[in-house]
Amino acid sequence: MKGYAGKILRVDLSQGRVKTETLDETLAQKFIGGSGLAAKILNDETGPETDPLGPENRLIFMTGPFAATPVITSGRHAVVTKSPLTGIFAESDSGGTWGPSLKRAGFDGIVILGKSAKPVYILVADGQAEIRDASHLWGQDTYELDPLIRKETHNEAVVASIGQGGEKGVKFASIMNDGNDGRAAGRGGTGAVMGSKNLKAIAVHGHQQIEIADPEGLKASLKEISPMVAKNAEGMRKNGTAGGVATFEALGSLPLQNWKFQGRWEQGAVKIAGPAMTEKILTGIYHCERCVIGCGRRVKIDKGPYAGVEGGGPEYETVALLGSLCLVDDLEAIAKANELCNRYGIDTISCGAAIAFAMEAYEKGLITKKDTGELELLWGRGDVLVKMVEKIGKREGLGNLLGEGVRIAAEKIGRNAVEFSLHVKGLEIPGHDPRCYNAGAVSYATINRGACHLGFSHVFERVLTMPEIGIEKTLPRLEAKGKGEAAAKTQNIMGLFDALKLCKFTMFGGLKLTPILSWYNMVTGIPMDMAKFLKTGERIFNLKRLYNVRCGISRKDDTLPARFLTLKHEGEGLTPSLPPLGEMLSDYYKFRGWSEEGIPLPEKLQELGL
């Protein structure tokens, strides 16, 4: 198979066994790879009866046909499982070098089940795999662990691991890779699943070359397109993903004070935005493998209370959730909190949301100093932010409750805490306000892992176009007509990115679907036209939805927190608006071929080969 290693590694930790399977070529064509192929495996092997933290749950690492090839921005891999945070389908995507390294080690993916009797790690090297004792590594954070495992295995090994957050079962624990550059499979609690299996890490390295069907054609296409993407994305390279913080604040999209803030936060946004990071603490930029953009930040703090911070810097979502959502405008405190999240292996989005939720609960008197360990959970306190990250990572005191996620925390606190527990299907809200983007609001409500900005519907309401799906010009943000259809179409093409393992930021560099499809054809040698390509994205999305339907998801769950449907964000220069979700949701279901209850209809499933 061109573009694939051709093998899947199966690991049963309960039995202490590893085996190799041949990749099913038919399934690879039908679901491509990444979270598409992983969704097929999860759907076949788990279901509503599966305990996310039980040995029967699968933890699936999957690359795609672009990984370990010359295709730009293809240094990515997916992690798919049943989420302990939401109880439904979970996928998380990470950049760096781990995914391509797994492919060069001889495998397209790894499927892990069972639970080891003691802490272990897996070594995958040049087509072979073994399970090794990790008892001496348990308790290490991810930054400490990386050089230790490379010393035990191979200096070229790339390590994906959990920190104390995953060990202790923080429901939004992440899986980190690439050492202190801090690349993360962050959302949905993949790290908690890994910890429940007593699996500390997976180290990979190898030298297998991936065969490409048309290497010369691919080389010529990349030579033409790569400079365009690099040039158009210069701003992201200069100031990182956080370069847009001030712009989003002016738009009303930046999350503020657990999403209830009224007015403007201009000065605070400037203090934590990308340009401030570039000026004050940036030491260099980080490129994932084959990246021509370089949005990753490397930072260092030499003095002050957070001296010693060094490594991967905060991304936009981190700055937004650990910063503005908590009204913290101390960039160095945010950088420290980000480092702690990376070391403990916990999702910066869910962590920031949990802390903001706790600050509002404290403000309303639902929790007191007795609950916080004498900490004053006041808005804007960077020192408190850092201490709360520590408590969550270690599951100490109030951090033990917040480590369950805001949905469970609100249920346990009671007394109407649910009113400001902001999540969709149990997954905390990321850093773009759905009151600003109607297609984005529909996408938040319906995307399969819960509240997720990576359906990317909102960016087509701000800066992007995609002629291949009928978006010839940027969509007006606050119009409702056609937004259900737009959300569905953009979700489908994002599923293709997640299956191929291609970075979505290439779209900010001007990349469209037509060259991506040509790359797929050149890499795999599989002749696919645009209609079939788009149908594949639709198939992948519907398969993920079917998994959730089996777990009880329907229209009742495709909604937004009441705060987004009733409280307008007002301030100078802002356009206060609320998304007409019911109307748009019906349009979305109709376009998708689902029932009014949000269930894919039999004729749609037949059309998609599901």
Image: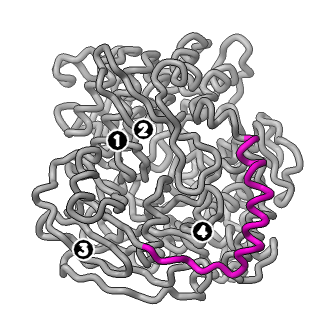
User: Would you name the residue on which mark 4 appears?
Assistant: 69
C-alpha span from label 4 to label 1:
28 Å
User: Would you name the residue on which mark 2 appears?
Assistant: 312
User: Would you name the residue on which mark 1 appears?
Assistant: 342
What element does badge 3 sit on?
loop
Q: Amino acid at mark 3?
A: Gly
Disc 1 residue crowd, few under 14, some 14–19, many 20+, Cα 10 Å: many
Magenta segment, which residues?
Answer: 207-232
Looking at marks 2 and 1 on the same chain, the residue that comes earlier in the sequence is marked by 2
Q: Amino acid at mark 2?
A: Gly
Name the disc covering residue 114, or none: 3
What element does badge 4 sit on?
loop
What element does badge 2 sit on?
strand
Residue 275 image offset from top left, x and y in percent: 59, 22
Front-lying residue, 563 or 209:
209
Closer to viewer: mark 4 or mark 2? 4
Q: Quadrant of the C terminus?
A: bottom right
- The reply to whether residue 364 is in sight is no
C-alpha span from label 2 to label 1:
9 Å
Residue at x 44%, y 64% (from the top left corner): 80
Looking at marks 4 and 1 on the same chain, the residue that comes earlier in the sequence is marked by 4
Looking at marks 3 and 2 on the same chain, the residue that comes earlier in the sequence is marked by 3
What element does badge 1 sit on?
helix
Q: Amino acid at mark 4?
A: Thr
Residue 107 image offset from top left, x and y in percent: 44, 77
CB of mark 2 within 8 Å of CB of mark 1? yes
C-alpha span from label 1 to label 3:
26 Å
Closer to viewer: mark 3 or mark 2? 2
Name the disc covering residue 319, or none: none
